[in-house]
Image (spheres, rainbow, N blue to C red):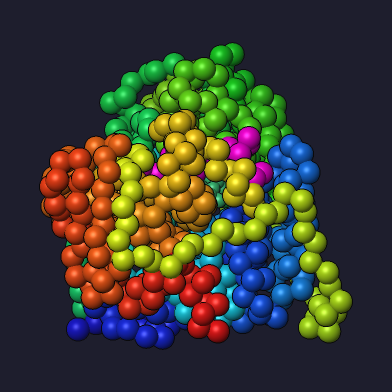
Amino acid sequence: MGYTLSQKIIKNHLVCGEMIPGTEIGLKIDQTLTQDATGTMAYLQFEAMGIDRVKTELSVAYIDHNTLQNGFENADDHRFIQSVAAKRGIRFSRPGNGICHQVHLERFGVPGKTLLGSDSHTPTGGGIGMLAMGAGGLDVAVAMGGGTYYIPMPKTVKVELTGKLNDYVSAKDIILEVLRIMSVKGGIGKIIEYTGEGVKSLSVPERATITNMGAELGATTSIFPSDEITKAFLEAQDRGEVYTPLSADEDALYDEEIKIDLTSLKPNAAMPHMPDNVKTVEEIGQIKIDQVCIGSCTNSSLYDMLKVAAILKGKTVAPGVSLSIAPGSKQVLNMLAGNGALADMIDAGARILESACGPCIGMGQSPNSAGISLRTFNRNFEGRSGTADAGVYLVSPETAAVSALTGVLTDPTTLGKMPVINMPEKFIINDNMVLLPDSPDEAKNREILYGPNIKAVPTGKELENDISSKVLLKVGDNITTDHIMPAGAKILPYRSNVPYLSQFCFGVCDKTFPERAKKENGGIIVGGANYGQGSSREHAALVPLYLGIRAVIAKSFARMHKANLINSGILPLTFINESDYDEISQGDDIELKGIKDSVLSSADAKLINKNTGKEYSLKTDFSEREINILLAGGKLNYTAKTK
Ligand code: MIC
Ligand code: SF4
């Protein structure tokens, strides 16, 4: 029996464990990336580990999220990251150079290598055949130090693409279709592999749009084969030498199969407030829109931007619409400027933003009250745009650009033939915004520059045998990390200041939560299915830890968040009977009796609801490594102990 592509890469990087789905495996990590919103914490943790220089083949620190600089905080964090990068052997991508995933794909990604990033959209690298995964900052810090990265061995889903996309239908419509089919929890514990004839008609940036948004499926990662198209992309980036052909064996066995006929695909949109709430644009109809935002790590490549410019050329944005465009990297922006496409956008009335995450993470461009915003982004979670009652629709660049002109959600295929887009044979290569680290000798004299907003990382406490506590909060299914620890312009600058951040914890669900948590001296959270989906931000665990949360009991967890909870020393426990969720209410006093013994022996744990006297069983499915981390009260404590 042959191997799937991801199984081949896993096999080549396997440090420990067996490739049996669901059991823990350890992987060697070749490359890492961080961004600034998670990076400050990751580098604080790296510094706490006391390692001189990174041990990876390549590590890059990007500045792309916190670029508003609405005060000294962001600039201080940038300076801190820059100083650590120089000292510890990490390349530093300066603000203005672009969004981490776009730049990494262009300039650093290598087919067949493993990439671990402190950002959930790291799987963008799967567009050139990398095994690229998102993780919490601490796991990335450990990988930078040469440590193994652990995941449950994923199952493999084969998505077979047949046919060819029609004009005005694009890669975004493919991944939205996959989301419609699989849902935001359909990818948990799985790697999505794209194969079939249809793959050959998709360029690398189109493939990257698809693997990027595999994060929204909850998938461990997504991957395309590395083929002639990958080779041409790498050669155009002057990096032809890193190309290797890679694909699955003919007789590879997959756990699931999905077929999508590209020819019959129509423009799709994910409606508020979930990326899997997908209908065709035609079905949704011509709703009036207030705003269009084009960009983000999902759709900001040169190809996307050239399509948008061609649609806008010689026209004017509708009077009731604000159109903003953020090209994904300096390379993209520079090339748009060089060939006149940028002028076409500006001429049509587009508001050009810097090459950064920007509105995608609520850093500016919040829509008007109850506004309707079309975005080429990957997440439309409630409140993420910065306007609580806004409705965000996720669409392709084609749908976004055409709708910006008409002022209503418009199916772009009604326009007939798409203008021809000529992609250049070579990209402009100039890595002058990526700083190389100091030599080991120079590094000795390099000072690490901390700012006053940088506060200590909270650490957990050893696991006790009985936990008696209150259910401080009960939430439903698909709670995202944006619910738990919101981002946005007002909060994001405080990513290195957990005490300050804590005031906003769960603000989207219940503004009283932080106060109540403090008053009660912590407690327990009860959640539904897919708890903690979305980003890799470990702040969604570190802040609850700071507020005294000892355990989260849910129907199921998203992979990265579960790992972040364990790393923080918070117990993630699952209901054995999902219906037991209904019998626990917010405010109930509960007891986890003998929890330490249960965790140690991997036995079911006992939950007593003191209000009703009833008992329930909870699953404690942890690996030996996870058990040790939980007993020690988190990964930092555990690492300090085992040193
Ligand atoms: C996001 O898209 O939610 C982010 C901001 O990029 C996060 C990381 C973070 O919270 O800093 C992610 O996707 O992991
Ligand atoms: Fe940045 Fe948005 Fe991509 Fe997250 S999803 S990395 S915020 S562009």
Q: Is residue 619 left or right of residue 380?
A: left
Verify whether residue 481 appears in magenta: yes
Query: Quick check: 286 left or right of 482?
Result: left
Q: Position of residue 507 (x, y in %)?
A: 48, 34
Give x and y (percent) for residue 294. 55, 36
The residue at 74%/37% (across/down) is 70
Q: Pick whichever, 189 or 162, lies toward us.
A: 189
Residue 341 in view of the camera: yes
Boundaries of the magenta span: 479-494
Residue 354 in percent (x, y) is at 70, 41
Task: Identify the image quadrant of residue 599.
Answer: bottom left
Vertical side of 442 occupied by 275: above or below: above
Residue found 14% across the figure and 52% down from its top: 615
Q: Quadrant of the N terminus?
A: bottom left
Q: Residue at x 67, y 71 (%)?
A: 47
Q: Residue at x 72, y 68 (%)?
A: 85
Say if 447 sits above or below 412 in the image.
below
* Residue in the foreground of this view, choosing between 219 and 181: 219
Give the image location of residue 300, x and y in percent: 57, 46
Q: Is residue 337 visible?
A: no
Residue 143 against residue 454 in the figure, above or below: below
Tell me the quadrant of the picture where the C terminus can be found.
bottom right
Q: Is residue 313 left or right of residue 419?
A: right
